[in-house]
Image: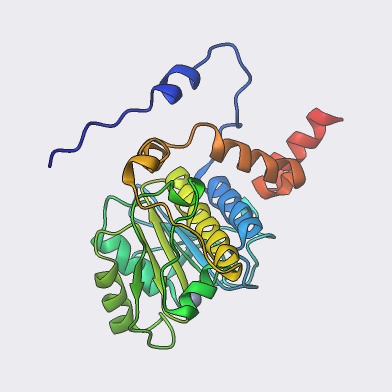
Amino acid sequence: MEMPKRSNPMMEKLAPLPGRHALLPELSARQELALLARALHREGYDDHIAGHITLAQPDGTFLVNPWELTWDEITADDVIRVDNTGAVVEGEWNVTPAIGLHLKVHQRRHDLKVVLHNHSRWGLIWSASGRVPPVYDQTSGQVEGDPIYYDEYAGTVDGASEAEAAAAALGDEKWAILKNHGVFVVGKDIRQAHLRAITLEHRCRLAWHVETLGGGQPITDPETLRVVQMSDDLGFPFLWEAMARREIRLDPRVLGEQAANSIERRGA
Ligand SMILES: [Zn+2]
């Protein structure tokens, strides 16, 4: 069946209002990655120093968060750059040994800019349960479809063959729950990766609560979610900007030392 062409009239009407304050300062790729890590940490992507985000660059390299740092302490200055073999080519920190899975996915999926993995707090409950959480509200249903449940867990994702198998299992999908391990989310840009990651964690959290109460009635009619699911392709209006502003407001150092000093000077 031919799907109707999607458009987001609200975004088109409201986003380019002239003369208003910018919703975010102009951000570098490093700053966007640091902001994404901080924003997701606040949502539940917070298993200590576990987890990695790769951001593909036009020159074939990848920006990635350092192995040593938690997602809520990373700044734009900390972001390192690796080549397509995973070797660090820029930066003062180490790269995770689990970079291989990210690189395999990037190799297979040139439509993607962002690949992220973590042992998120609520996602892990479903990962361990062996089930995919039902959709119990619209926020849980902002991204269409169920995550794949990848059950060939091999202990880590740092071996080349395991990485190849996991990347193949993801296929053309947008997200996965890794059995007894965590979650895996990909996106065409930072905005889409952010929405998918927070939607997955919200879905896992709400479903856990609902089922702890004894269960509820999942949303099964696709028409109920048709409007909110436009956000995955086209962007949820103003959401990423608001979440990024919160991180900048709480700690301007997330943007790196130079940018933080500039903000402090302006605020003085
Ligand atoms: Zn992991």
In the orientation shown, which residue stands out farthest toward the right?
268
Picture coordinates of residue 195, whole percent (x, y): 48, 47
In the image, 81 versus 196, the foreground residue is 196
Q: In the image, what residue occupies the spot 55% across and 56% down?
A: 202
Picture coordinates of residue 140, whole percent (x, y): 48, 52
Picture coordinates of residue 34, whole percent (x, y): 59, 52
Q: Quadrant of residue 134?
A: bottom left
Picture coordinates of residue 197, whole percent (x, y): 49, 56
Position of 255 with respect to 116 (left or right) is right
Is 268 placed above or below 81 here?
above
Q: In the image, what residue occupies the spot 34% across and 75% down?
A: 150
Is 57 placed above or below 183 here?
above
In the orientation shown, which residue stands out farthest toward the left?
1
Q: In the image, what residue occupies the spot 38% across and 88% down?
A: 154
User: Where's the C terminus, which quadrant?
Assistant: top right
Q: Quadrant of residue 264?
A: top right
Does residue 27 appear in this view? no
In the orientation shown, which residue stands out farthest toward the top?
19
Q: In the image, what residue occupies the spot 60% across and 32% down?
A: 24
Does residue 241 appear in this view? yes
Is 47 placed above or below 1 here?
below
- Total marks placed: 0
Position of 167 with respect to 141 (left or right) is left
User: Where's the N terminus, which quadrant?
Assistant: top left
In the image, 14 versus 257, the foreground residue is 14
Question: What sort of colour scheme is used for the picture?
Answer: rainbow
In the orientation shown, which residue stands out farthest toward the bottom?
155
